[in-house]
Amino acid sequence: MAEIKGDHSVHVVSEAEPVSAKPLPNTPKRVASLDIFRGLTVALMILVDDAGDQWPVIGHAPWNGCHLADFVMPFFLFIVGMAIPLSLKKIPNKLLAVKKVIVRTLKLLFWGLLLQGGFSHAPDHLSYGVDMKHIRWCGILQRIALAYLVVSLVEIISRSRQARNDPELTNLSIFKLYYWHWLVAACILTVYMALLYGVHVPDWQFTVHNPDSIYNGTTFTVSCGVRGKLDPPCNAVGYIDRVVLGINHVYKKPAWRRSEACTVKPRYEGPFKKTAPAWCYAPFEPEGILSSISAILSTIIGLHFGHVLVHLQDHLLRLKQWILIGLTLLTLGFVLHFTHAIPLNKQLYSLSYVCVTSGAAALVFSAFYVMVDIFGLKLLFIPLKWIGMNAMFVYVMAAEGIFAGFINGWYYDNPQNTLVYWIQEHVFIRVWHSTKLGILLYVIFAEILFWAVIAGILHQLGMYWKL
């Protein structure tokens, strides 16, 4: 991901130094807590993707609400934002900085289309290729690419002529110094809210393209004719994607399929109710155009945290601002949700969702910063640090299932009889006499911990996958 493994050296007070308000010399040092936070986010992605079917409480919320999986994307975007000022401050030439940003963006788009566009069918299907009439244009890396591009260009274009490490900067003056970023955020929020509540959503049709469904080839009509609705079938987010991208180019298995209105067993994938409404069978893009515009806000909030890290040279001053902002965002998000003003919704990337997830990211990062960069408890989180320093590699191999797909390609008698399935069944499921617990332990030890060790070996060899 854009800054999924980026350069982020900045002055960090060592654990032997007093935590005081006195500015300290500017000696570059890698921010270990940012690597660990990145590693945690990749580990969470592996956990929720591979164990979420058995443990729906950690999988994506079917519609409104926020489960563990719903924190992964905004955490990534927050981290990307934090890393931007730390990496771009090393490139004083604006033209070179723009070139670097554009090249990284193109790399992200390439890998996003390759991994999530439908070309790769790993790990469960031993085939490759995608019908261009049904390629998925959006995805995780594409959303990160958009946020990275927009926020990086704003950072470069509005780069201040003031000294980048002015010790006189205060909490308020950092906001004033980078006021352009907040103006851009306000414009993004205004456009998002205007489209979300102002666009008229007409009735629409779709055809089921699923050979396993009894309705394969059937065309359904969904009745809407409304404006400002935030329900699954009639929201502006889905409508804009259907018009701009085309309904055949959006995600075929949205989380809403597990909603109470659709499935026989709510929260679990399974057969639909006989009374399930037509939209339960429809596609929906969770990383679509309008929701990705809103997602830029998560990166801008992370960008501010990066500015604080660059300009404020004291632990207490940094933490005071980070924690205050985190608590404010959490409070605002929960108020919006529980007053039913704006529901928490990952699929729509609602304002309340931006606030809650960014506030959570702020507090989680602050906790890591205290434990790792102040108290020096790096060894406790070394597996996460290794993953975070080679996060793109682990994301592709583990989270996208490329390595498991390669292993599954070597089977005995039938494609279900592979080393991966054998380990799941004989080492974990049968030992614990539970599919749910066995799969959870398999993901933790045979995937997350395994790839942490591999990333650690690569770290010792000085090998990193950078974009």
Image (tube, rainbow, N blue to C red):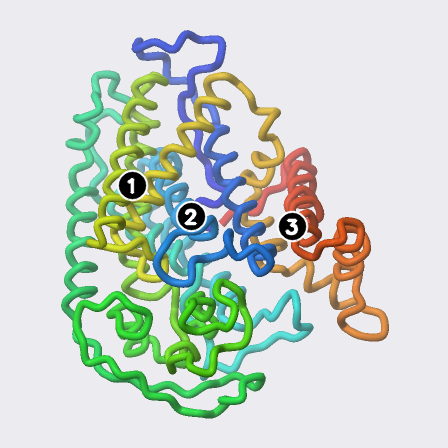
Left or right, 127 with respect to 175, comes to: right
Q: Mark 3: which amino acid? A: Leu
- Label 3 belongs to which residue? 440
Image location (x, y in percent) of residue 92 = 31, 36
In the image, 128 versus 223, the foreground residue is 223
Image location (x, y in percent) of residue 229 = 22, 68
Tell which circle, 3 or 2, labels the residue nearer the N-terminal end.
2
Left or right, 221 with respect to 368, comes to: left
Q: Mark 1: which amino acid? A: Ile
Q: Secondary structure at mark 2?
A: helix
Q: In this picture, is 13 found above or below 332?
A: above
- Label 1 belongs to which residue? 301
The Cα atoms of the two marked residues, 3 and 2, are separated by 19 Å
Q: Mark 2: which amino acid? A: Phe
Q: Residue furthest right?
A: 413
Tell me the residue at 32%/44% (across/down): 356
- Label 2 belongs to which residue? 71
Is there CB contact under 8 Å for labels 1 and 3? no
